[in-house]
Amino acid sequence: MATASQSPNAANVRHQEVTRLLQKGDLNAAATLCDRLIAEFPQFLPAWHTSSFIALCRGQIASASQMIHHALAGSPSDPRFLLQQARVLAAQRRFADSLTSAEAAEKGAARDPALLDAIGSFYSSIGEHERACGAYSQAIALEPSQAIFWFNRATVQRFLGRLGAAEDDYDRTIALRPDDCEAYVNRSELRKQTPDRNHVEVMERLLAPGVASWRGEVQLHHALAKEYEDLGNYSDSWRHLEKGARLRRKHLQYDVRYDTDTVDWIIEAFPAAPAASIGGCPSLEPIFVLGLPRSGTTLVERILGSHSQVFAAGELNHFASALVSAALAGNGGRPLPRPQLIAATRELDFAALGADYLERTRPATSQRPHFTDKMPLNYLYCGLIRRALPNARIVHVTRHPMASCYAMFKTLFKDGYPFSYDLDDVARYYVGYRRLMDHWRNTMPGTIYDVSYEQLVRDQEGESRRLLAACGLEWEAGCLEFHRNPAVTTTASASQVRRPLYDSSLQQWRHYESQLGGLRNRLLAAGIPAAELGAQ
């Protein structure tokens, strides 16, 4: 056994090995070694902190709480421990306490730029983007040569609508780290590029000799596709878009049949309208805004969120999470294959499901009488939403099929939507989506309010009035000024919704009609009417 004088050094050496294993992503080995470290050196507080971190990564919230309390008992003002406590409290949904702990950590980390950066990332993760910006700014003031600090601040500046400041921060990021391809693609999205102000030449130079990371190459291709499109160079735009999408698709393990089969399983599970006796949770609060990604759901949410009675909650995954939890609970917590999981959702306590969904959205959504949930993929759950929350409003945003498919294909999503990088996958997914939405309309007439993106752009006031009325809201002229709404937006449309309505995107796909000909033919063959697809 190590002597007292050797113990701190031996514990540090062991702890460094735990850290190395965590950096490798070997959570199990790190946990085993950390447990041994605690058993041998119970007074070594960083091990308790790391053990809490590992437990939280594993979803073991109670254990994570116990471990960080032990660390704080020995050093109650350590900012690292306070930050970890804030993470645990957030996982326990104790957001006010979590914020208090994070603020205490921030005060204690006044001279530690790396820890301030971590605190900023925590603030951002709980939606406190203004506080995140402040923490990142402190880190930058202490160590302005760290590109990651500038990058992280640029991200929250974009969320907050400070697009010029975000561009400046991305410029600094790239000056410090010229091969940061994600910074290039994010910067390109902030505004429409012009002949006098663009980044085409520098990105082409960076791409020419080859990019070590395939992800970086994908990002540069998408950034160049966007900037060339802004400049009206559609042939080069498509060339880069196709290369980037093909490379991204190559690195995905995905079969679109799994998603199209899911539509069949849902229709089979819910062939008819819900029975009146189901009841459900009677809340009038939720307004679900759903559809395909890049269809205009963010725009509709901004309009609704500009109303005094509506809080725009963004893209919430809470309905799907509550649904899966309820279904698995009926199976003793054991996982189920997707067909059986969907079938199991027919037998749920729908009132309890609705109540659980509302509880998961708290406390943010209790600010106003109504809130929006803008998760596009909630279209999969319309039948279940109707059963669980029969008084909730469901707004479905539609878009021209070709424009919708092109908009998805050209977007480099950070997460999700794996179907969007291959035009055949896009077509098949779109057809499945249409089939399911037709099924919901046919089985639940009058439940879903459809908003056409094109009509909204062409008749903003008329369509906005009808939208508010459909949601049971009085007209407020401020809803026409949605672009002035200071609320945070974290979606791919974060830059676009800071501008007044514009119609340039309505016909953008027509610049690529020949390249999209195969997509059009697939949609036609699947029964999408030619009148909807537009003349070639």
Image (cartoon, rainbow, N blue to C red):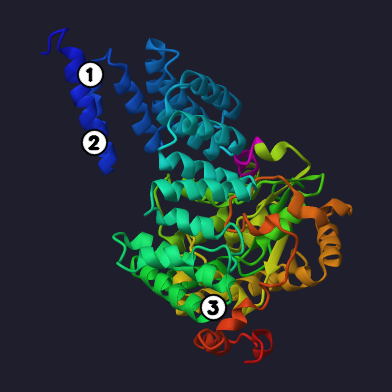
SS at mark 2 in the image: helix
Q: Is residue 238 above or below residue 77?
A: below
Q: Quadrant of residue 207?
A: bottom left
Looking at the image, the residue that sits furthest to the bottom is 536
Residue at image coords 58%, 54%: 491
Q: Label 1 is placed on what type of residue?
A: Ala
User: Does the magenta run of residues contain 358?
Assistant: yes
> Disc 3 marks which residue?
233
Magenta residues, as a range? 356-363
Residue 322 visible in the displayed image: no
Residue 377 visible in the displayed image: yes
Check the picture and name the quadrant holding the C terminus.
Answer: bottom right
Return the residue nearer the eye: 285 or 126: 126
- The label nearer to you, 1 versus 3, is 3
Q: Label 2 is placed on what type of residue?
A: Arg
Residue 20 is labelled as 2
The first of marks 1 and 2 along the sequence is 2
Return the residue nearer the eye: 73 or 298: 298
SS at mark 1 in the image: helix
Horizontal side, residue 422 vs residue 498: left or right: left
> Disc 1 marks which residue?
39
Q: Residues within 10 Å of mark 1 (few under 14, many from 20)?
A: few
